[in-house]
Image: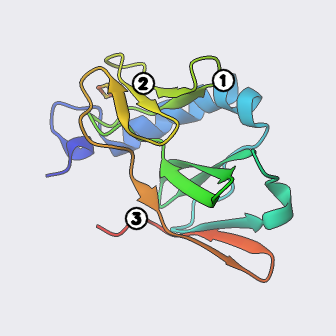
Amino acid sequence: MRDRDHPTGPGRRSALLRFGGALGAVALGACGRGPESTAPGAEFALDELPPGGRRLLVVDGDPVEVTHTESGLVARSLVCTHFGCPLRWDAAKNQYVCPCHEGAFGADGRPVAGPPVRPLRVLPVRVEAGRVRVEPAPS
Ligand code: FES
């Protein structure tokens, strides 16, 4: 059983619903972009994500953030690895923060505070003909 499916946890769908609300209030302001798609994978034009930029997507029903780092594009799940709450990026702290149990993850996705012990999931990213495609994480 995955943590996000834990019976006492908030579950994946409720996490997504809460993410949707939080997205409008906080994440959109930070990133300037909304979810792209509810399809299993999601894509967008590479030139829409300049170096240093962040972009929010929905991939296979889960919130995902794509960052354009010096070493390339990285797609991370924004579902907390503790009990599945939606995360948000806190630029002042340089961390992904979880509102449920005060968990936090560094910019590299590793847990740095609170109960989470596993890093954020990284999803496959493919760039082809100027389009960025993010695939669901393998199970
Ligand atoms: S769900 Fe518990 S710290 Fe995120």
Horizontal and vertical percent position of residue 89 = 58, 30
Mark sitting earlier along the chain (3/2)? 2
Quarter holding the C terminus? bottom left
Whether residue 13 sits left or right of residue 127 in the image: it is left
* Labelled disc at residue 26: 1
Residue 53: image quadrant is: top right
Please determine whether, in this image, residue 19 is positioned above or below residue 52: above
Q: Residue at x 63, y 32 (%)?
A: 23
Please determine whether, in this image, residue 22 is positioned above or below residue 131: above
Whether residue 62 sits left or right of residue 120 in the image: it is right
Horizontal and vertical percent position of residue 26 = 66, 23
Q: Nearer the viewer, residue 68 or 39?
A: 68
Residue that badge 2 annotates = 98
- Badge 2 element: loop
User: Crowding at label 2, few (<14), some or many (≥20) Cα neighbours within 10 Å?
Assistant: many
Count every numbered label the image shows and give the total: 3
- Furthest toward the right, the residue is 47
Work out how far the residue at label 3 is from the one at label 2, CA to CA, in angstroms: 21 Å
Work out how far the residue at label 1 is from the one at label 2, CA to CA, in angstroms: 13 Å
- Badge 1 element: helix
Q: Residue at x 48, y 30 (%)?
A: 18
Does mark 3's beta carbon lie closer than 8 Å to ligand 1?
no
Mark sitting earlier along the chain (1/2)? 1
